[in-house]
């Protein structure tokens, strides 16, 4: 990650940056990403399955489910969608 930051790209791409990290290590990486995000002349593409990480860092969320676009929009809207609730948050939805 230090090498990527040193290169100073306009676009940062992270694929599950906290995978395998302890609860003590992960916040350090998330703080670094948040600092990069604060620099408005940069774009960050983050692939992540941990919903707490997504909620903390995302301005826009795109969700793929079974290879198809399931949701796209602001975090609160996407996380409230039925597909995301069922597929990624483990909530069973009642049939209407």
Image: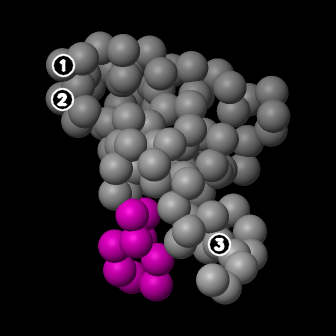
Q: State the SS at label 3.
A: helix
Q: Please tell me whether residue 48 is drawn above or below residue 41 in the rendered image.
A: below
Residue highlighted by disc 2: 10
The quarter of the rendered structure image containing the C terminus is bottom right
As measured in the structure, the alpha-carbon distance from the residue carrying label 3 to the one carrying label 2 is: 35 Å
Q: Is 14 located above or below residue 5 in the figure?
A: below
Total labels: the figure holds 3
The colour scheme used to paint the residues is one colour
Q: Quick one: label 2 or label 1, which is nearer the N terminus?
A: 2
Within-10-Å neighbours for mark 3: few <14, some 14–19, many 20+:
few
Task: Identify the magenta region.
Answer: 63-71
Residue depicted at x 73% and y 42%: 21
Q: Earlier in the sequence, mark 3 or mark 2?
A: 2
Tell me, yes or no, if residue 30 can be seen here. yes
Neighbor class of circle 2 (other Cα within 10 Å; few <14, some 14-19, many 20+) is few
Whether the residues at callouts 2 and 1 have beta carbons within 8 Å, the answer is yes
Q: Residue at x 47, y 21 (%)?
A: 34
Q: Provide the residue designation for mark 1.
A: 41
Pair 2/1: label in front: 1
Name the disc covering residue 86, or none: 3
- Element under disc 1: loop
Relative to 48, 94 lies left or right: right
């Amino acid at each position: 990650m230090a090498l990527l930051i040193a290169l100073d790209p306009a676009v940062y791409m992270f694929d599950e940056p906290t995978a395998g990290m302890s609860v003590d290590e992960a916040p350090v990486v998330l703080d670094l990403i948040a600092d990069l995000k604060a620099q408005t002349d940069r774009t960050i593409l983050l692939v992540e399955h941990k919903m707490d990480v997504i909620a903390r860092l995302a301005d826009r969320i795109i969700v793929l489910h079974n290879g198809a676009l399931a949701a796209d929009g602001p975090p609160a809207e996407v996380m409230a969608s039925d597909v995301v609730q069922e597929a990624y948050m483990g909530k069973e939805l009642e049939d209407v």
